[in-house]
Image (cartoon, rainbow, N blue to C red):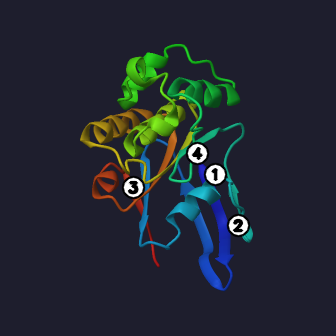
Amino acid sequence: MIVFDNVNLSFGRRELFKNISLNLRGGRVIGITGANGSGKSTLLKLAGKIIRPDSGEVKFPSPMTIAAVAPEMKIYDNLTAEENLFFFAKLRGKRLENILELGERVGLDLKTFGTTRADNFSTGMRQRLKFAILLSVDADIWLLDEPTANLDNAGREKFFHEINVAKASKIILLATNDKAEVEACDEIISLPL
């Protein structure tokens, strides 16, 4: 469980969160919706301890691990798809046994594109690679920020299948305003502007 205990956060004069208290449990996909600028991505960053609140606390049990798919997530353009996967897995102390199967799970044909540098990938293929990286590190907490952006229908179906399978053993937070992503959620937190 991720616990927000009286969390406050402001950016300059703008108070984004005031005395937020939440208990975010696994076993479901928790959607975070709201207008642009309402704090969806910021809430994910607080949950992942990427940013700290001005006051209050965000807690989760140790030793839980976190992985994310977000627009600002960077992959290494000068590395191939396989090299990116091995690099990020190694950072987490993971060994990739069946990389081709991992590619199949996200719809990225690594037989064909595994040795292609990431800078030659379309935005949809880059998104599939980001999702494959998330799957490869097998984290306890998934922070997903508009994760199906730029994916075709087949890629979206694979993504929804994977989160549906994973939610039984993970805490999954999904920031979105995309109708299909919202429908994949079991619970919605709607942020006011």
Of residues 36 and 167, the one nearer the viewer is: 36
Q: Earlier in the sequence, mark 2 or mark 4?
A: 2
Q: Residues within 10 Å of mark 2 (few under 14, many from 20)?
A: some
Camera sees residue 167: no
Please give the label number shown on residue 187: 3
Q: Earlier in the sequence, mark 4 or mark 1?
A: 1
Query: Are dots 4 and 3 in contact, CB under 8 Å?
Result: no
Cα separation, mark 1 vs mark 2, equals 12 Å
- Between disc 4 and disc 3, the foreground one is 4
Q: Residues within 10 Å of mark 3 (few under 14, many from 20)?
A: some
Provide the residue designation for mark 4: 74
Identity, as a three-letter code, of the amino acid under mark 2: Pro
Identity, as a three-letter code, of the amino acid under mark 3: Glu
Picture quadrant of residue 45 = bottom right
- Residue 18: x percent and y percent? 62, 77
In this rendering, is residue 151 above or below 104? below
Provide the residue designation for mark 1: 48
- Between disc 2 and disc 3, the foreground one is 2
In this rendering, is residue 116 above or below 27? above
Q: Earlier in the sequence, mark 4 or mark 3?
A: 4
- Between disc 2 and disc 4, the foreground one is 4
Cα separation, mark 4 vs mark 1, equals 17 Å
* Element carrying mark 2: loop
Outermost residue, top side: 97
* Element carrying mark 4: loop
Identity, as a three-letter code, of the amino acid under mark 1: Gly
Provide the residue designation for mark 2: 53
Q: Earlier in the sequence, mark 1 or mark 2?
A: 1
Q: Earlier in the sequence, mark 3 or mark 1?
A: 1
Q: Residue at x 59, y 47 (%)?
A: 1
Outermost residue, left side: 153
